[in-house]
Image: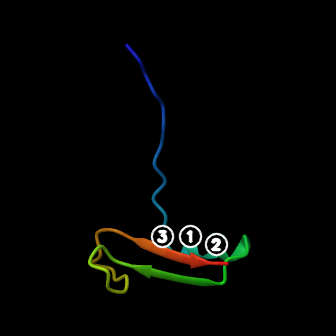
């Protein structure tokens, strides 16, 4: 039987935003699963980042 170890990191937008800025991204936007701006009620985060 195969066993694969992995982990999932759950990031807040604030933390992800800071990391993206540190590596050179400047335009960073976050959306919810409905394509509208991210809110606390969003169940999924979609991030668009442009260098």
Q: Is residue 51 left or right of residue 41?
A: right
**Picture coordinates of residue 25, whole percent (x, y):** 67, 77
Residue identified by numbered label 3? 12
What is the secondary structure assignment of the residue under circle 1? helix
Q: Give the CA separation, mark 3 to mark 2.
A: 12 Å
Q: Say whether disc 3 or disc 2 marks the residue closer to the N-terminus.
A: 3
Q: Quadrant of the C terminus?
A: bottom right
Q: Nearer the viewer, mark 3 or mark 2?
A: 2
Residue 43 in the image: state x and y as whole percent: 28, 69
Mark 2 lies on residue = 20
Local crowd at mark 2 within 10 Å, few (<14), some, or many (≥20)? Answer: some
CB within 8 Å, label 1 to label 3: yes
Depth check: 45 or 40 in front?
Answer: 45
Q: Quadrant of the N terminus?
A: top left
Q: In the image, what residue occupies the spot 48% across and 31% down?
A: 5
The image quarter in which residue 42 lies: bottom left
Q: Residue at x 33, y 77 (%)?
A: 32
Identity of the residue drawn at 45% across and 27% down = 4
């Amino acid at each position: 039987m195969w066993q694969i170890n992995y982990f999932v990191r759950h990031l807040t937008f604030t933390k992800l935003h800071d990391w993206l800025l540190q590596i050179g991204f400047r335009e960073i936007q976050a959306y919810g699963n409905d394509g509208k701006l991210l809110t606390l009620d969003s169940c999924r985060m979609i991030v668009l980042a442009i260098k």
